[in-house]
Image (spheres, rainbow, N blue to C red):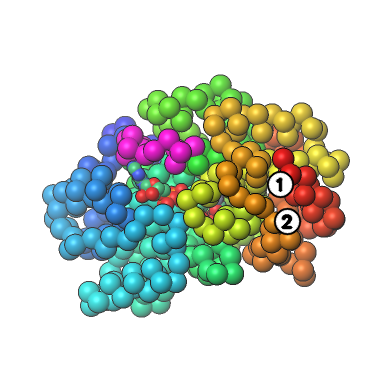
Amino acid sequence: MGGAETVRVELGSRGYDILVGDGLLAQAGPLVKAATGGRAPIVVTDETVAGLHLATLERSLADAGIPTGPAIVLPAGEKTKDFAHLERLLDAILGRGIERSAALLALGGGVIGDITGFAAAVALRGIDFVQVPTTLLAQVDSSVGGKTGINTRQGKNLVGAFHQPKLVIADTAALDTLPRREVLAGYAEVVKYGLIRLPGFFDWLEENGARVVDGDGAARREAVTVSCRAKADIVGVDERESGDRALLNLGHTFGHALEAATGFGPRLLHGEAVSIGMVLAFELSVRLGLCPAADAARASTHLAAVGLPVRPTDVPGVDWDVDELVGHMAKDKKVRDGRITFILARRIGDAFTRRDVDSAVVRELLVEAVRG
Ligand SMILES: NC(=O)c1ccc[n+]([C@@H]2O[C@H](COP(=O)([O-])OP(=O)(O)OC[C@H]3O[C@@H](n4cnc5c(N)ncnc54)[C@H](O)[C@@H]3O)[C@@H](O)[C@H]2O)c1
Ligand SMILES: O=C(O)C(=O)C[C@@H](O)[C@H](O)[C@H](O)COP(=O)(O)O
Ligand SMILES: [Zn+2]
């Protein structure tokens, strides 16, 4: 592809390419056709993205000789990632009389990617799907790696499956229409790669982060490509999170609890929760004597400088309940023998997992954090 970067996720027969570049939506047709073995996919999107980018994609698919039927359009936002919408989605897919050779195409952010990927994992016990992410968060993180699923009353992403896409097409120009708050939420996951294992990338973000969030084309492409490479490297060696993949969860044990406590609503976006969660994870590392306070301060300062929330008290109108947060954290998928696995840091760019964290220290940290 002229002008596009290709990042390979090396997973043997389940391996796939991630294409990153401006204008790829209009060139998606032949790429999707090759990935689906010549079949027209069923496109799943949300109401906002349908109005902005669906026509471009559909035109490209039709020009490639794979005209699609009507897209399945779900409501926008995190609340769509639930059982009710999954049922509605599966009903719509199965209602088209599909065979096992069918493929889905997720056009949208992480919500559409996660629920569509899960529908693909379970429809007829597994059909193919392609990811066409349109948020920064989805381009740098959720479209890659095959974690699919939904939220439940019990918590975040508690029902799901590992199911890898056949192809990821990240059109960075599609981010031009993304509201700034959503850009920032995605940027938190970009910073995550620097914090867990790429200190040089974190340095670069301190210099260039403002360009990334302001939509500078070259900076944005670089941030998406480096992030995808980092995630592809980790997923390629630990697809099912038995080891290093857990590092991608930096900030998520706290973050998912904050999201659950706010009802998965628009008050706190996933990326915003991750930003606060990463700062709490660094502060926990400092309290445990594992990380210099200066590194925690540097991480927090950068996230706050671009405009992300870094404390629970930065979220307006929430009366945080520490018992409730601790209860949500106890349901984290990384709990083993009743102990939460925390992702901590020795310094910026050097994260590790730890299971023997004293719960009293965690509680004390949260009590102080929600007080402000
Ligand atoms: N599977 C994974 O590995 C993984 C990784 C990270 C996050 N996630 C999940 O991803 C979800 C968050 O994804 P998200 O932040 O993309 O949220 P999202 O899918 O809700 O999208 C955010 C908002 O942006 C709108 N939007 C999408 N593309 C747009 C565009 N180009 N222009 C204008 N508006 C656009 C959407 O309609 C929505 O309102 C969470 O559920 C999170 O748990 C999953
Ligand atoms: O891909 C991964 O692995 C991640 O942890 C990426 C996270 O950014 C993402 O939010 C993921 O969905 C969290 O996974 P979970 O297993 O904690 O639900
Ligand atoms: Zn995340």
**Quarter that holds the C terminus:** top right
Task: Say if the magenta span includes residue 369.
Answer: no
48 or 116: nearer the viewer: 48
Answer with left or right where residue 324 lies relative to residue 151: right
Q: Quadrant of ligand 2?
A: bottom right
**As drawn, 148 above or below 173:** below
Which is more N-terminal, label 2 or label 1?
2
Marks 1 and 2 in Cβ contact (< 8 Å): yes
> In the rendered image, which quarter contains the N terminus?
top left
Residue 257, located in which quarter of the rendered image? bottom right
Looking at the image, residue 301 lies above or below residue 357:
above
Which label belongs to residue 320? none
- Most common secondary structure along the magenta stretch: helix
Question: Can you see residue 306?
Answer: yes
Q: Residue under circle 2?
A: 322
SS at badge 1: helix
Q: Nearer the viewer, residue 354 or 293?
A: 293
For the point 58% across and 27% down, the residue is 305
Give the residues in magenta: 172-184
Q: Is residue 362 above or below residue 191?
A: below
Residue sitting at x 73%, y 56%: 322
Q: Position of residue 365 (x, y in %)?
A: 78, 47
- As helix, strand or loop, the secondary structure at mark 2 comes to helix
Residue ID at (41%, 62%): 80
Q: Is residue 200 visible?
A: no
Q: Is residue 181 magenta?
A: yes
Name the mark on residue 370. Answer: 1
